């Protein structure tokens, strides 16, 4: 019988807090949680413990994807299984809705195995809104809809304060919720202890979000300085999803049956990146999300790693990008007490990786560099389907998108 004690030893530990890396570290795990962290030789190794030698390797917290689209379908289980194998231990789905809640609970109680953890949102939006699930118009109907989603078991509420790129007759500056409706949604969600994440690209929706006190603003492809300053002043989280307007997305949408997306994304590309650079300079809390898992031109698990690369291209250090994808995302979703950092008492979600991530964040983009993926103290082996999936798709190395930095 396998021991419920494991110790990962001799690796360079990046614990997700932003502190200095610990060389020759030891992380002791009992059951699902971390029992001790310290220098090798100072952490007791219980008799019978499984020892994982990480000599010459880097240990980081499991990656948290902060803007996924994963529901409750059989395909969703495959996405979450492949996500976990790629080093993403938690996916925060902005459109899980009620079927996704069932999947979340199955993963948590162990009846659905081998999948990344799911943090599940329910959508509440206006008639003809950019995001769709529970339609509600006017402040009182919005409040009722939020209460229904709380009762259904949502981890957070998702809505929209602007249009988006998707529909042919919709633009990013199309109106969605008014300030009054958004204020009611935020007030009601907060009354029940749930955070609010809002899809928003432009003004005036960005100002509505800031004034209403939402917790997270996602996208901001046409974000302006006023909005960046407001996000900073209110202490909100900004999840820019830069891969939405990266070169690969624009090129592939231009060649698809939705060329209007590519046109507007191209218009936004430099504005988007300038906004992220300013947000970083001002010290805005930046999270990592990417409209996961993406179109058919993205391998499952890949787009999140490219998002990290995009953030580094916009001025974040590799350490800051790692923190954004671990600690900051956990904090943004109210999960920091159990996820996001490698500290005593937290869930044992970690990666053992070849290479120096602080010298080159793109190390994570190559699946072969990820030696061990652990979630809740369980080491996830790479199954044959996953090996074949990556072997076939990586014969031609993917380009490094630089999102307009030509």
Image (cartoon, helix red, strand yellow):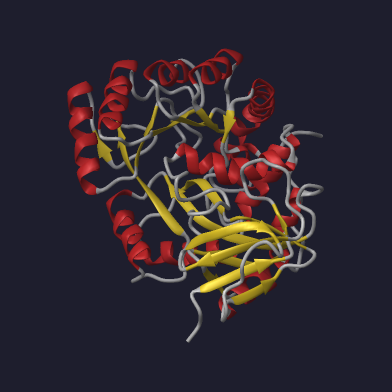
Q: In which quarter of the image is residue 8?
A: bottom right
Is residue 289 visible in this depiction of the protein? no
Q: Is residue 53 left or right of residue 195?
A: right
Name the foreground residue: 147 vs 39. Answer: 39
Relative to 315, is 76 on the left or the right?
A: left
Is 77 situated above or below 67? below
x 29%, y 42%: residue: 133
Please name the residue shown 55% across and 35% down the image: 260
Is residue 88 at all visible to an observer of this figure? yes
* Percent of width and height locating residue 197: 42, 34
Note whether 23 is above or below 74 in the view shown: above
180 is higher (above) or lower (below) than 71: above
Q: Is residue 398 above or below residue 268?
A: below
Q: In which quarter of the image is the C terminus?
A: top right
Residue 197 located left or right of residue 240? left
> What's the residue at 31%, 60% (across, down)?
105
Front in this rendered view, residue 303 or 5: 5
Q: Where is residue 240 in the image (x, y as percent from the top left)?
A: 57, 34
- Observer-nearest of 351 and 48: 48
Residue nearest the observer in this picture, 252 or 201: 201
Q: Residue furthest bottom?
A: 1
Count of marks, rendered view:
0
Percent across and percent down for residue 195 are: 37, 35
């Amino acid at each position: 019988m396998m021991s419920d004690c494991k110790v990962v030893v001799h690796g360079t530990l990046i614990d997700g807090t932003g502190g200095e890396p610990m060389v020759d570290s030891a992380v002791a795990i009992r059951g699902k949680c971390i029992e001790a962290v310290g220098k090798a030789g100072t952490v007791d190794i219980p008799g019978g413990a499984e020892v994982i030698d990480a000599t010459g390797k880097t240990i980081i917290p499991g990656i948290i994807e902060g803007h996924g689209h994963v529901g409750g379908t059989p395909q969703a289980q495959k996405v979450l299984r492949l996500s976990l194998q790629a080093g993403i231990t938690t996916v925060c789905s902005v459109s899980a809705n009620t079927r996704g809640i069932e999947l979340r609970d199955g993963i948590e109680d162990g009846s659905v195995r081998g999948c990344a953890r799911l943090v599940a949102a329910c959508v509440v939006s206006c008639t003809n809104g950019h995001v769709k699930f529970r339609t509600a118009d006017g402040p009182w109907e919005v409040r009722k809809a939020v209460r229904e989603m709380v009762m259904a078991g949502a981890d957070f509420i998702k809505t929209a304060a602007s249009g988006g790129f998707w529909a042919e007759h919709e633009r990013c500056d199309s109106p969605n919720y008014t300030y009054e409706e958004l204020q009611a949604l935020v007030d009601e969600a907060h009354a029940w202890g749930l955070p609010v994440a809002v899809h928003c690209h432009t003004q005036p929706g960005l100002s509505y979000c800031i004034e209403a006190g939402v917790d997270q603003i996602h996208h901001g492809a046409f974000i302006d300085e006023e909005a960046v300053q407001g996000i900073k002043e209110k202490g909100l989280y900004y999840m820019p999803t830069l891969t939405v307007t990266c070169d690969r997305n624009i090129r592939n949408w231009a060649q698809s049956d939705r060329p209007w997306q590519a046109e507007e994304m191209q218009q936004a590309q430099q504005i988007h990146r300038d906004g992220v650079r300013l947000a970083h300079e001002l010290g805005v809390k930046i999270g990592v999300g990417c409209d996961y898992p993406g179109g058919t031109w993205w391998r499952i698990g890949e787009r999140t790693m490219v998002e990290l690369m995009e953030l580094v291209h916009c001025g974040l250090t590799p350490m800051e990008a790692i923190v954004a994808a671990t600690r900051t995302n956990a904090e943004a979703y109210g999960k920091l007490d159990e996820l996001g950092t490698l500290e005593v008492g937290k869930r044992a979600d970690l990666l053992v990786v070849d290479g120096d991530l602080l010298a080159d964040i793109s190390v994570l983009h190559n699946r072969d560099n990820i030696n061990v993926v652990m979630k809740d103290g369980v080491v996830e082996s790479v199954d044959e389907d996953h090996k074949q999936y990556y072997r076939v798709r990586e014969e031609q190395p993917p380009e490094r998108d630089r999102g307009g930095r030509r």
